[in-house]
């Protein structure tokens, strides 16, 4: 399945919120807005790398179903 750059950014931001909802530390972690702005500067290829997906065990489709 094909995903747009905007869809992948939104999914990465959703993942960020999920991962840091209980463990966010402003001394070390980016704010949500900072993270979102950082993701918006990346190409689609770079964004897909940020998802840490592969073609066998954890696919981009899996990631998008979970966070998209």
Image (cartoon, grey):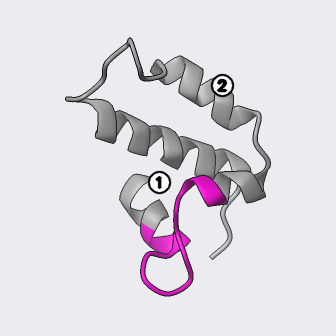
Q: Tags 2 and 1 in contact by the CB under 8 Å rule?
A: no
Q: Tell me the element at label 2.
A: helix
Q: Quadrant of residue 14?
A: top left
Q: Is residue 51 magenta?
A: yes
Q: Which mark is residue 11?
A: none
Tell me: 7 left or right of 40.
left
Q: Which residue is mark 1?
A: 68
Residue at image position (49%, 38%) is: 13
Residue 5 coordinates in the image, percent (x, y)? 71, 50
Residue with the most extreme top position: 27
Magenta span dominant secondary structure = loop
Residue at image position (51%, 72%) is: 61
Tell me: 3 left or right of 24.
right
Q: Which residue is mark 2?
A: 37
Q: CA distance from mark 2 to mark 1?
A: 18 Å
Residue at image position (75%, 42%) is: 42
Mark 1, other Cα within 10 Å: few <14 / some 14–19 / many ≥20: some
Q: Is residue 65 magenta?
A: no
Magenta extent:
49-62
């Amino acid at each position: 399945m094909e995903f747009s750059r905007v869809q992948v950014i939104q999914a990465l931001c959703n993942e960020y919120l999920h991962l840091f909802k209980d463990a966010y530390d402003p001394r070390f972690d980016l704010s949500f807005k900072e993270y979102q702005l950082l993701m918006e500067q990346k190409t689609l290829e770079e964004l897909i790398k940020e998802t840490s997906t592969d073609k066998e065990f954890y696919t981009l489709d899996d990631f998008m179903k979970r966070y998209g």
